[in-house]
Amino acid sequence: MEVYLRHDPAAAPLPLVLDSPHSGTHYPADFAHLPPRAVVRRPRTRMSKRCSPARPMPGATLVEALFPRAYIDPNRHPSDIDPAVAGRTVAGTRRALAQDRGSASDSSGGWRKAACRCMARPLSVADVERRIALYYEPYHAAVAAALDERYRRFGVVWHLNCHSMPAVGDVMSDDPGRERAEFVLGDRDGTTCEPEFTAFVAATLSAMGYEVAINDPYKASSWCARHGRPAERRHSLQIEINRRLYMDEVSLARTAGFGALQADLVRLIEALADYVRARA
């Protein structure tokens, strides 16, 4: 089973890499889950195949996960395992092996609770280690390889970590019941990319008429912190797109806003390509 897809530009590449860790729709045979498949599908980012530009992205490289986040979440640290999900031995083993867990803001919080409700049974050590080795690590290796290739060629790279989010914070989030902006950008309070990059993306989206928030409620994952080292000219920004813009969050069906959003995402990537081209 394929773990990820990498889409390279047809024309000359730019040091611009996008990744979509929550777009997976290929369900491994050993994924035993309690809720119906439609319920398990809801947390995934329904953007990569459906809302991504219909034509090749100018100079950008895209890496997308093919496995579902409910199977193993590539946006979490591998030590971020709760005993209720995988048993105390598994959780303790992963934490002992971990060299860094990111900041406290990376706590799996709602994901742990969701996973508890989703898993048909607790996972064994072998289960977790297999998922990490066969899915989690290959995906991250692919993203890192794309970033490193562009960095070696250009001496600089920009990374966009792509997600979608519920329109309203749920009971497991840090903002329960609160209406969210249409786009949320996260740069861990200016530490994962140059401030000009965050400001450029925010200004581009705002000029299109979208409401944009920065680091509220999402500051970006520890993987943005790992890939984003602006002092080394490695810039990483997380982007969250409000699902209300393009889908019914209950039925998961596209809405009338889908086409307009897709066109605006094309414009955004074209603007990013110009931004990168001028600085590479």
Image (spheres, helix red, strand yellow):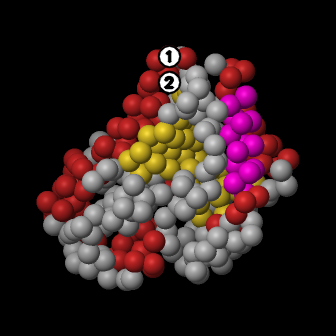
First to last magenta residue range: 261-275
Residue 196 lies left or right of residue 102; in this view the side is: right
Q: Is residue 113 visible?
A: no
Q: Nearer the viewer, residue 248 or 85?
A: 248
Q: Residues within 10 Å of mark 2 (few under 14, many from 20)?
A: some
Tell me which corner region of the image, top left, top right, bottom left or bottom right, holds residue 252. Answer: bottom right
Element on which disc 1 rests:
helix
Q: CA distance from mark 2 to mark 1?
A: 5 Å
Tell me the quarter of the picture where residue 131 sits: bottom left
- Res 126 label: none
Secondary structure beneath disc 2? helix
Residue holding disc 2: 150
The kind of residue tagged 1 is Arg
- Per the rendering, the mark at residue 153 is 1
260 in the magenta segment: no
- Are the residues at dot 2 and dot 1 in contact (C-beta closer than 8 Å)? yes
Q: Residues within 10 Å of mark 1 (few under 14, many from 20)?
A: few
- Quadrant location of residue 171? bottom right
Residue 237 in picture, x, y percent from top left? 59, 42
Query: Type of residue at label 2?
Result: Arg
Task: Give percent across and percent down for residue 147.
Answer: 47, 30
In this view, 166 is above or below 120: above
Q: Is residue 267 on the magenta stretch?
A: yes
At which x and y percent is residue 220?
Answer: 55, 50
Task: Look at 47% across and 57% down and name the residue there.
Answer: 22
